[in-house]
Amino acid sequence: MRELLVFIFLLLLGGHGTKADDVIYGQQQGYNYGTVLVSTIDGHLRALDTLTGREKWALKEGPVLRAPSSIRQGFTFLPNPMDGSLYSLKEGTLKKMPFNIPQLVHLSPSKDSQGVLYAGNKQDVWFGLDPETGIKVETLSSMTSERICPANKARAIFIGRSEYRLSMFDTNDRNRHWNATFTDYSAHLLPTDAAYPFQHFASSSTGHILTVDADGQIVWEKDLGQPIVAMYLLQHDGLHKLRYTVIGRESMERLIKVLKNSDVIEPFIPALIARGLVVMTRDNARIVVYM
């Protein structure tokens, strides 16, 4: 039931899909852009080769989102695993709440106009990773400090992780309460690397990733088998933001078909998601994929 509640939200963004074969279309030589680090809903961090999409290693952490599996009439909330935003479910209608889980934790203890009490706490941890193997070599937090493999410490890259725990209580009915835990790696991210030449598209409901170069050519495709909640670029100085566009499964299929059958030679303009369309512009022409 917990998985059902989470995927209800994901399915609002796109349809179901089947696992596709990993495909490599071409390689860019002579540059080191680091490693693409993908966070999936099941808690895995997967390191992918930027040029080929080949999986280098995978690190299993706790689930990105933990929420109740039961539905309480008039007091059910659906969290978005991508950013922790909350939607209230009442009488079959979803309504977005003004604050997400991290914001409510920062504001706690607090009370809203409907008589709901909020209480929360945040736990931060730094862990050092060997970028070549994904092995944790050190963990640092306010609670503990642990060195696991000191020999690899010199090349370790530190990644910050924040865990937000939120509890909500209905003062009008003490039997109604709701708890959730949301994990985020974005609080300590470095800016986007302006020299990064690729664009990534991710399916909203599957683990399908499509990578396109500056000329609009497909570089590689990969299916991780789990919905993607975040993407990062792991470089020597740490974790950078990595922009990507979320689209529905059918739109992904149409986009791939268009790119394979179009001579895109001008610089590829970032996809614009507007009015149900994926629009890509080259020269004075527009490639339109209906969602």
Image (tube, rainbow, N blue to C red):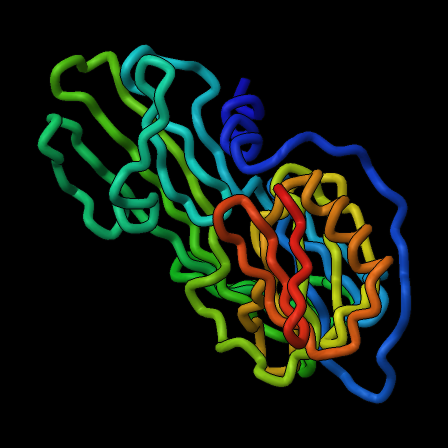
- Residue 240 picture quarter: bottom right
Q: Nearer the viewer, residue 167 or 93?
A: 93
Image: 169 above or below 97: above
Q: Nearer the viewer, residue 60 or 152?
A: 60
Residue at (82% x, 37% y) in the render: 19
Q: Is residue 81 left or right of residue 101?
A: right
- Residue 245 picture quarter: bottom right
Residue at (38% x, 47% y) in the render: 164
- Residue 285 picture quarter: bottom right
Residue at (75% x, 56% y) in the render: 210
Residue 235 shows in this picture:
yes
Image: 85 above or below 217: above
Image quarter of the N terminus: top right
Residue 150 shows in this picture:
no
Image quarter of the C terminus: top right
Q: Nearer the viewer, residue 126 or 79?
A: 79
Residue at (31% x, 18% y) in the render: 90
Image: 228 above or below 137: above
Q: Residue furthest bottom?
A: 30
Q: Is residue 119 left or right of residue 248?
A: left
Q: Residue furthest front?
A: 284
- Where is residue 160 shown, x and y percent of the image? 49, 64
- Where is residue 239 shown, x and y percent of the image? 57, 71
Q: How many numbered marks are there? A: 0
- Where is residue 287 shown, x and y percent of the image? 68, 59
